[in-house]
Image (cartoon, rainbow, N blue to C red):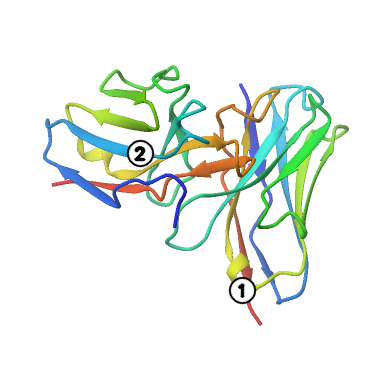
């Protein structure tokens, strides 16, 4: 059972907009920034969004994110087949004194 | 740019220890640390801890804090993660990732390619 809660799966067709939620509590998302990672099959995770809503250079603006209170969400617009991957949210947890990850959301492009 | 290259796959017996290395390039390792994250087969990401050379300290996850040690060799720009008393549920891919000066509250980017550690009798 992960500290941050994500849906286990999500799906969409090419060109659609998909959102992935991440729910936490006062000790993690309620206190600290959230970061999002994308993991393509068989590869290492890669930073997708940092500090709630910032895109690293090279990440297309199709990817956006937001945070409100103890919840966060990642949105992917103009869905492409290469977006098929696992997506993870993460944040520091003040109570556990450690980094916590969501369980991951497997995105399928139909 | 920052790059992290990890050591190769390991097979260990239960009760043994493993030491995974993570060689950094593109930055001064005495100023910036790394975090370690593992991923069991078919499972999600699990944070193990970080070593902050900037602050000169380490922080370990409660689950493994009695069995893990993270160190740095600044002469070779290499970080190490040693896990002792291995169990079958330690079988996972272990990743190192750059976390800047203050690993707490920071993001992880980039990541090493991962090291598969298999624990089996």
- Helix, strand or loop status at disc 2: strand
Q: Is residue B100 left or right of residue A41?
A: right
Q: Nearer the viewer, residue B63 or B41?
A: B63
In percent of width and height, residue B66 lies at 77, 59
Q: Nearer the viewer, residue B66 or B78?
A: B66
Q: Which of A23 and A39 is in front in this view?
A: A23
Whether callout 2 and callout 1 share a subunit is answered: no
Q: Which of marks 2 and 1 is in front?
A: 2
* Mark linked to residue B46: none
Subunit bearing disc 1:
B
Crowdedness of circle 1 by 10 Å Cα count: few (<14), some, many (20+)?
some
Q: How many labels does the image show?
A: 2
In percent of width and height, residue B93 lies at 56, 56
Please tell me which residue is depicted at 36% across the width and 33% down the height of the picture.
A71
In percent of width and height, residue B69 lies at 79, 51
Q: Quadrant of residue B107?
A: top right
Q: Which residue lies furthest to the right in this view?
A: B75
Please tell me which residue is depicted at 66% across the width and 24% down the height of the picture.
B100
Q: Distance between the residues labelled 2 and 1?
A: 30 Å
Q: Which residue lies under the disc numbered 2?
A: A22
Please tell me which residue is depicted at 36% across the width and 25% down the height of the picture.
A67
> Does B13 appear above or below B70?
below
Q: Which residue lies furthest to the bottom in this view?
A: B121
Q: Quadrant of residue A18?
A: top left
In percent of width and height, residue B80 lies at 77, 46
**Quadrant, the N terminus of chain B:** top right
Subunit bearing disc 2:
A
Q: Which residue lies under the disc numbered 1?
A: B88
């Amino acid at each position: 059972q992960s500290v941050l809660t994500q849906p286990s799966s999500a799906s969409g067709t090419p060109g659609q907009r998909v959102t992935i939620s991440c729910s936490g509590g006062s000790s993690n998302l309620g206190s600290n920034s959230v970061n999002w990672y994308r993991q393509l099959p068989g590869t290492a995770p890669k930073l997708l969004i940092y500090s709630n809503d910032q895109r690293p250079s090279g990440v297309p603006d199709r990817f956006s994110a937001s945070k409100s209170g103890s919840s966060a969400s990642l949105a992917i617009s103009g869905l492409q087949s290469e977006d098929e991957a696992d997506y993870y949210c993460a944040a520091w947890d003040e109570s556990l004194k450690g980094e916590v990850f969501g369980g991951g959301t497997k995105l399928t492009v139909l | 740019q920052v790059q992290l290259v990890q050591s190769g796959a390991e097979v260990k017996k239960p009760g043994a220890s493993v030491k995974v290395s993570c060689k950094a390039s593109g930055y001064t390792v005495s100023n910036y640390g790394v975090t370690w994250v593992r991923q069991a087969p078919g499972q999600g990401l699990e944070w193990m801890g970080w070593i902050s050379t900037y602050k000169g300290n380490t922080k370990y996850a409660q689950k493994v804090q009695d069995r893990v040690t993270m160190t740095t060799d600044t002469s070779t720009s290499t970080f190490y993660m040693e896990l002792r008393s291995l169990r079958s549920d330690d079988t996972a891919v272990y990743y190192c990732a750059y976390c800047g000066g203050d690993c707490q509250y920071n993001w992880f980017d980039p990541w090493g390619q991962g090291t598969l550690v298999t624990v089996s009798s």
